[in-house]
Amino acid sequence: MEFFIDGVPMQAEDGQTVIQAARANGVDIPHFCWHPELSVPGNCRICMVEVEQEKGDPWFDIACNMPVTEGMRVLLHSEKIVRLRKQTMQFITLNHPVDCGICNKSGECTLQDFHYAHNGQASLSRDAKTHATKFFPLSDRIMLDNERCIMCTLCVRFTNEVSQSKALCAVNRGDHALIRPAEDANFDNDQYSDNVIDLCPVGALLSRQLLDHARVWYLQPTRSVCPGCERGCSIDIWHRKPEWALRALDPRLNTRIDRVTPHENPEVNGLWVCNKARDLAALFERPRATQATLGGAATDLATATASAARLIAAARHPVALVSSWGSNEELAAFATALAPHVQPFVKADHLPLPGEVVEDHLLIKPDKNPNRRAALALFPALPGTLAEAITPQTDLVLVWGEGFDGSAVPAGARVIRLDAYADPVQAQADVFIPVSIQTERSGHYTNFAGVVSPFTACFAPAAGIAHAEELFRAIGLALAPAVAGALTGPAA
Amino acid sequence: MTWWERAYLPEILRGLGITTGIFLRNMAKWVTGRRGAVTTYYPEEKRADFAPRNRGKHILTQRPDGSPQCIACNMCATVCPAKVIEIEAGFDANDPQHPKYPVRFEIDYSRCVFCGLCIEACPEDAIRMEQDVPSLVAGDRWAMWLTMDEMLTWNPKQDVAKPYPPKPARPAPGEGAPGGRGPSTH
Ligand code: SF4
Ligand code: SF4
Ligand code: SF4
Ligand code: SF4
Ligand code: FES
């Protein structure tokens, strides 16, 4: 059906509210409490619009809860609406502390933006502001600043409708209203709790990890994929912009993951991610392996690559354990360059941790590896008992990635390891080559449903770290003449 | 040139006479404790005739209890055209009046252009520039970073422009601040 916004004709579907129809037509109506995926409480009133009538006075209603009707004429910028919005902003900021200088949301704050867009005036109130709890620990991960809260209840509705933990509620009324944990629930148990930090339009819900350490305008997002489980949620990894690189302070701050937010992807994760994605910094920033070794002695990458090729060429029953954290590109390179020379099996790099939620109603999937499906499409899975894959005849085991302790390797067999993180077993390998991690390379993962998502490099790898994809090609090149020339050892 | 000038020696003697005269005059003033030639014994001595609004060395102002007034908001660092201010923030939830404070605050004097924009941007009057020009002599560029302890060694009692009010008492829980915080300026 047709309707009008400020006199411009637009198309709307049956049952759409004004705010939805306007967004579908590229017009943004200011809103705090409305969210496309949550119910409509209509409590902030900033989305108020004027509707012109054929005859009689115009009337006013909130765009988030008013269905579009045929021929409706909506005004967003009439004199009355402009004044109304200004007064609404005055009201919402009545008890707001406006401590933007130290607020984590500053730079992304809707309240700040709307103040400049729709109000821009000092408070007219002569009364003292109502004070409230400044830093209330809502959970181990989240701190609540009640003074900044504007009671939009987005967080409460999120825990009721999306994460379904029902962990938050609102207590008291008027300017004494507070967000509080619900009595019979524990917000710590909500696997999606960190989404409320993004959801909160102001800096009331604060991530304890990020608390006041970085200002958002110093950070940039890089599109990536969460490797936490086979869902492979699309995420943005935020890190310091190169033009704001620090010189005097710790240079590691320049290559640190400051925060992780969901990247909207309707095919995979919609608008949310679970807390495991938020903790990727801890996963990726574990101590790294940086030195290629031959039997524990340091060597350079070229020598290690050549030695690995020589060992593979010399082996009679080589077995390879393929990482289920490799990208599609790396797996393809492995399939063309190495698979003809070794017997590959796909291993699980990560298993669910004790106490970890294995599967739930929303996103979390049981397999804790991002790319097992793509790996299984190319290579067979590791059999239930390792002994079926690694038999006493096996004289070479190539281990790519984590999750294999090496005790099953028969005595006398040679071991080649490719890994990104430091691990004492690497010193026992005949050849060890350090490889790059997901934040240092670009590629794609295929999730459990077959959806392919890209990830992009955020940082450059340190010198002496190889990209597995290039490594496989190099080994493959060295191997081809070696096998054809009946082990004459050209790589030596 | 006249023949007198071309004779050379008399002019040399005249020049020596002028030099000796000035030397003796200054010497006499110096011996009697007055100021002679306008010479500054740099770097021990600083010039006394800087303009009152000269933009020199950065200082961080302090609260009456001696803590830096800076709230580590990074406004100065953001506005700085040379991008030479680096601040590491700390957070203390037990001090709700001033939860955020600088742990490290450094300015790279090898690249600062003394534009004063950082001072303009600060919402807290926490950073200022002294009249005196800093000593910009250093063996290498890393020694030219001005650190927080150096910026805090300035004695606020001598600063007439900044009245240091006593720190307001924290309101007891449940009781509003005396007089409130006043209407916001935004
Ligand atoms: S929530 Fe927004 S307006 Fe309020 S202090 Fe933070 S940045 Fe400023
Ligand atoms: S904490 Fe944030 S999301 Fe929750 S009600 Fe307050 S302003 Fe809204
Ligand atoms: S004076 Fe100018 S260049 Fe120097 S630190 Fe301040 S803003 Fe930066
Ligand atoms: S602008 Fe002022 S308060 Fe903010 S960080 Fe700089 S000196 Fe500190
Ligand atoms: S967005 Fe419509 S009332 Fe809040």
Image: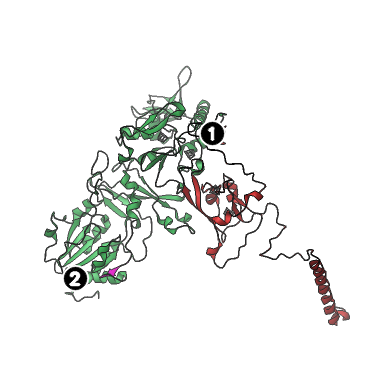
Chain colours: A green, B red
Secondary structure category for the residue under label 1:
loop
The kind of residue tagged 1 is: Ala
Whether callout 1 and callout 2 share a subunit is answered no
Chain hosting mark 1: B
Q: Quadrant of the N terminus of chain B?
A: bottom right
Disc 2 Cβ-to-ligand 3 distance below 8 Å: no
Which residues make up the magenta segment?
Answer: A290-298
Does B72 appear above or below B17?
Answer: above
Q: Residue at x 82, y 76 (%)?
A: B16
Q: Which residue is mark 2?
A: A313
Observer-nearest of A386 and A334: A386
Q: Which residue is mark 1?
A: B177
Q: Which mark is residue A463?
A: none
Does A454 appear above or below A40?
Answer: below
Where residue A241 sits: x, y (%)?
44, 53
Where residue A305 sits: x, y (%)?
27, 69
Does A316 appear above or below A108?
Answer: below
Observer-nearest of A247 and A333: A247
Q: Residue furthest top?
A: A56
Q: Residue at x 12, y 59 (%)?
A: A387
Q: Quadrant of the C terminus of chain B?
A: top right
**Residue A295 part of the magenta segment:** yes
The kind of residue tagged 2 is: Ala
Numbered disc in front, either 1 or 2: 1
Mark 1 → mark 2, Cα distance in angstroms: 79 Å
